[in-house]
Amino acid sequence: MVNIKKFVSVVLAFILIMLCMPTTYADTTVSTAIYVFSNNDGSYSTSANNSNGLRAFNNSSSQKIAKQNNDIFYFDANPNRKLIKINNSMFLEAEEINVNVKSTAAVNSIISAYSIQGKLREDLLQTNQMALSLDWESIDAQLYVPTRNTSNSNGAIYTGYNGARYKDYVYTATAQSSYYNISQLTGKISAVAAKTLQTFIVRSLGSSSASSQIGVLLTLQDIFGSLFESYPTSTSIQTQVSSCETKTRRYTYIESPVYADSFSCRAISDTGSQYFRYLTITPGQLEHFANADTCYYCGDNYYNLDEMAYSYRFGGGIEVWKETVSSFKLNAFQSFSSVNP
């Protein structure tokens, strides 16, 4: 009996000790921080080789970076230093330039200061012309160019597909077009509320172009909901539409296989989002705004443009490989130019 009591006492003491000990758990947290290593040419990789030939992560030679958006990152220690995301493991240091696209003088100054040539130069000038002629409701643009703070006269470069040398430029813009009257959506609520609205994207692929539907099918009733229910179906309304878009265009330059340190643009791709903003004017000239669902697009080769640039380094029948967006259509009612066609 004494032995049983002694055994129970020992067990209870052990349990008490265990309850008083601090609890520990397995660490299942996944760090979202990204650490990169300099390649000494203006590019940075997410891994580096140490003296033993093994990959090293987050050591004294690494630098922490953070995400500004899908394409642009910045150094955590200095947010003014930007990086273009080439792919999931490669980044290129870049300089951020705010572009006043409504000023021809400002655009020409950037082109001159950064020696911008080819398709990027054409696009900068074209966006300037569009901003002046199409009367955008609003437009905001940034250009990211390989940083010039390196010993390389070409600025930051990276070694990519098949060991060739590349450099990327990124041009991003957010814009809202002017409003256009849509006669097919103007009239009695009973006649226009249930009309199907479709969004079509027009894009180039290589030397050809094609149109395809994106997004979901909607009606004015879907977009404005209970607003229409507050008026008799015999009420006459007027509808105007504007295109709202955020686009990022990537330009990949490859070093000439013949002339060292000579780079030319051989591949371009777009990614972005777009939606239509509707303005319905009801009796008494009351204005009501509503947005359709946002549509997203991205070129199939957007994150491996170095491979496309390599394939077309000699031209390949076309000067530049393109997978770009030129316009958006609302049914057959109205076509809206993309911010940077």
Image (spheres, rainbow, N blue to C red):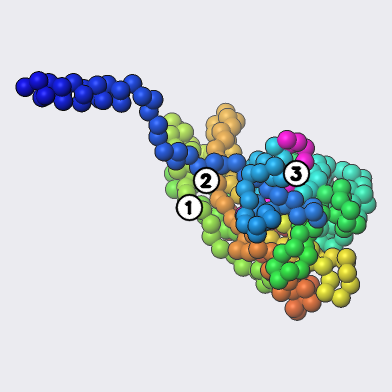
Residue 142, relative to residue 265: is it above or below?
Answer: above
| Secondary structure found at label 1 | strand
Q: Which mark is residue 293?
A: 2
Q: Amino acid at mark 1?
A: Val
Dot placed on the residue nearer the N-terminal end, 2 or 1? 1
Observer-side mark, 3 or 1, equals: 3
Q: Which residues are magenta?
A: 77-89
Dot placed on the residue nearer the N-terminal end, 2 or 3? 3
| Secondary structure found at label 3 | strand
Name the residue tied to disc 1.
Answer: 216
Say which residue appears at 44% left-offset and 48% top-offset. 194
Image marks 2 and 1: residues in contact by CB distance under 8 Å = yes
Q: Is residue 42 left or right of residue 206?
A: right
Q: Is residue 150 left or right of residue 317?
A: right
Q: Name the one closer to the observer, 59 or 326.
A: 59
Residue 254, relative to residue 129: is it above or below?
Answer: below
Is residue 90 magenta-colored?
A: no
Q: Residues within 10 Å of mark 3 (few under 14, many from 20)?
A: many
| Helix, strand or loop for the magenta stretch, by majority | strand
C-alpha distance separating marks 3 and 1: 36 Å
